[in-house]
Amino acid sequence: MQKIRIGIVGYGNIGRGVQSAINQSDDMELIAVFTRRDASTLNVNDPKVKVIHIDNAFNYVNEIDVMILCGGSANDLPTQGPQFAAKFNTVDTFDTHAKIPEYFEKMDESSKMCKKISAISIGWDPGLFSINRMFAEAILPNGENYTFWGKGVSQGHSEALKKVEGVKYGIQYTIPKEDAINKVRLGENPKLTTKERHLRECFIVPEENSNRDKIETTIKNMPNYFEPYETVIHFITEEEFKENHKKMPHGGFVIRTGKTGFNNENNQLYEFSIKLESNPEFTSSIVVAYARAIYRMNKEGIYGAKTVFDIPIGYLSPKSMADLRKELL
Amino acid sequence: MQKIRIGIVGYGNIGRGVQSAINQSDDMELIAVFTRRDASTLNVNDPKVKVIHIDNAFNYVNEIDVMILCGGSANDLPTQGPQFAAKFNTVDTFDTHAKIPEYFEKMDESSKMCKKISAISIGWDPGLFSINRMFAEAILPNGENYTFWGKGVSQGHSEALKKVEGVKYGIQYTIPKEDAINKVRLGENPKLTTKERHLRECFIVPEENSNRDKIETTIKNMPNYFEPYETVIHFITEEEFKENHKKMPHGGFVIRTGKTGFNNENNQLYEFSIKLESNPEFTSSIVVAYARAIYRMNKEGIYGAKTVFDIPIGYLSPKSMADLRKELL
C-alpha cells in the first residue's frame, strides 16, 4: 500500500509532535520538514526526512499528499495558510476563535483553486472540544454547555510571569475549580465566569536577594492575566523547577447537562474530558488523524475548507468503513 | 421555514422519547405515529398528531421527510427496516452488534433504490460510544479502549429476576466497578473481562412467606445472567420499590489511555461519560438529531445507508455551518 506522504511546515513543539505521531502510523510517512531557518542547521533526527527551506516548498507539490502547517495563529498561519492551501491539502491548528470565520473563507477560496482540502482549526480546542460542545447542544437542546481548561500550563501567563522584576523562572498552571465542576454536574446550570471556573497556580524561582512580597503583589495585580483571578503563588528552588516543571501537561472538560421528557423531568449529563502529559503531542496526534481524513476525502473528489464539523469521523481511522462498522460500532 | 416532518413507527419507550424530543426542536414537527395496534385505541396525547395503522404507512411518502423506526432489533427492524428504507429517509436504533454488517448491506440496498438515507444503529451504544471508541483509537493508536456500562437498569436481567420463584417485583442495575475505572485511568491497561468491570445489584420485593435464602441462591447461581458476576441482592418493600425504582437510569464510560512521543514517554487520557435519568429519552434525543442530519444531507443529494461514522456532525445541529464555526468552534 502506498503510504500517505506528509510534509511539515515549521519545526517547533507541534512540528515535532507531528513527526512522532507519524512514527506511530503505519499508513503514513514523513517526507520533508520545511523551515524558515537555514535548512543545513536544522536536525530532525531522521536521515530519511529531508529538510528544505520554506521558499522551495512549492517544488514538492507532487511529492507531498498533505502539508501540515505547524506555525502559530498570530503571525504564521494568516499568510502561510492561504498560500499553502492553494497548492496542497493542508491541516492547521488555527486557534484565534474570533478570526475563524474570516480565515475559513480565505482557506476555502485557496483550496477550491487547486481542488484540494484545507482542514482548519484542528486540535483539541478548537477541535475535539468543539465537537463535544456541538454534539451535546444538538442532542440536549434544553441545557447548558460548560468548558473548563486544565490542569495545564498556560504559555501566555508563564511568559507574563517571566517579565516580573525579580523572577528568574516562572510557570503558570490553569486549574479548573472542583466545586464549580461539581455544581455543573449536578445540573444546577450555575452562572460561572471564566474566573469562577478556574484558579491560577504559579511556581516561581526568584532571583537572589529579590523581594518576594513585591513579586507576589506585582503578579496578583497584573490586570487581565491575574488580577480578576484567584492566584496562588509558590516560591521554589531552581532544582525543583527543573525537575518538576519541564513537561507541558494540559487537559480539560466539556460538560453539558440537559433536561428531557414531556415535562423536562429527567436530567441527562454529558461529559468529555482529557488529561494530557503532553499538550503539543496530543494536539499533533489529532492533526495527523485529520491529515489522513482529508487525504481520503480528497481522493473521493471532495475539496474546499473543512472543520471538524464537516469531516465524517470514519475517515480519521486507517480502517475501512466496513471494518469500523464490524469492530467499533 | 418549512419544518422537518417526522413519522414515528412504533410507540413504546423510544417512540414516546422521540415525540418528547421533537417537542424540544423548533425545526421539526411530528406528523404521525404508525402502529400495529388498532389505531383508534392508541392515545398519543396530542391532537395534531395522526395515529395510522402501519399497513397504510406508504400512503404518507409525500407527507413525511424522515421516518423514525422505534421497533426492536430482534423482531421488528430486520424486516421493517429494509421495507421502510425503500420508501423513506429512516433512522433506527439497531443494536445487535454482530448483525450490523448484514443489516447495513440490506438497508443500503433499500435506500439506494429510492435515493434516500437510512441512518442505522443510532443511539448511545451503538452510537455516541462508538464515535468515542473510534475517535480515541484514531488519535491514540498506541493505547487501549475500555467501555463501562452503568449505573443502569438492564431490562434482560430484570426480566430474569421476575421469573425466580418467590419474586414479586425485581430490578437489576449494572454498576461499573470504581477500582477498575481508576486502574484504567492510571494508564495501567489492565486486562479486564466484562465481569471484572461490572457488578450486578438487584432490588427484590419477595412474595409473602417466600424463602429469601432460596431466592438469593437461585439468583446468584443463574448461569450467564448472574453466576460469573459479583451480585448484590437487597430485599425491599413494595412501597420502596414503587417509590425509588420506577425510572430508567443508565450511563457509562468510554476511556482510552494512550502513549505519545518519540519514546512513548507521555500518557494521554481520553474519557467520555454519560449519566442519564432516562435511558430511552437520551437515546431518542440522539435519534432525533440524526433525523435532522440525514434530512439535510439528503437535500444535498446524498443517499444510502449511513452510520455515525459517515455523518458529519455539523448536520446534527439546526444551526448553519457558518454559525457553528462562529459560535461553537
Image (cartoon, coloured by chain):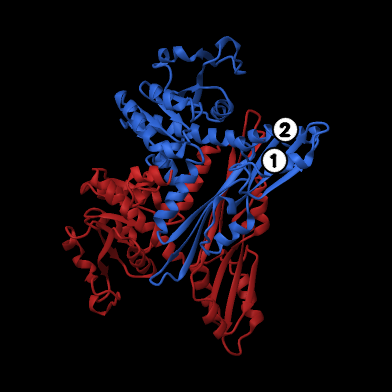
Chain colours: A red, B blue
**Nearest to N terminus: mark 2 or mark 1:** 2
Marks 2/1: CA–CA distance: 9 Å
The image shows residue B271, relative to residue B66, as above or below, that is below
Residue occupying image coordinates x 46% and y 55%? A125
Q: Chain of mark 1?
A: B
Can I make out residue B280 in this image? yes
**Residues tagged 2 and 1 counted as in contact (Cβ below 8 A):** yes
Q: Report crowding for label 1: few under 14, some 14 to 19, many 20 or more residues within 10 A (C-alpha).
A: some
Task: Name above or below for residue B271 compared with residue B11.
Answer: below
Compared with A202, B321 (above or below) is: above
**Farthest residue, direction right:** B209
Q: Quadrant of residue A51?
A: bottom left
Mark seen at residue B218: 1
Q: Residue A163: image x %, image y %?
A: 51, 77
Q: Amino acid at mark 2?
A: Glu
Mark 2: secondary structure: loop
Taking depth in this image into account, of B250 and B295 the one nearest to the observer is B250
Q: Is B143 displayed left or right of B247 in the figure?
A: left
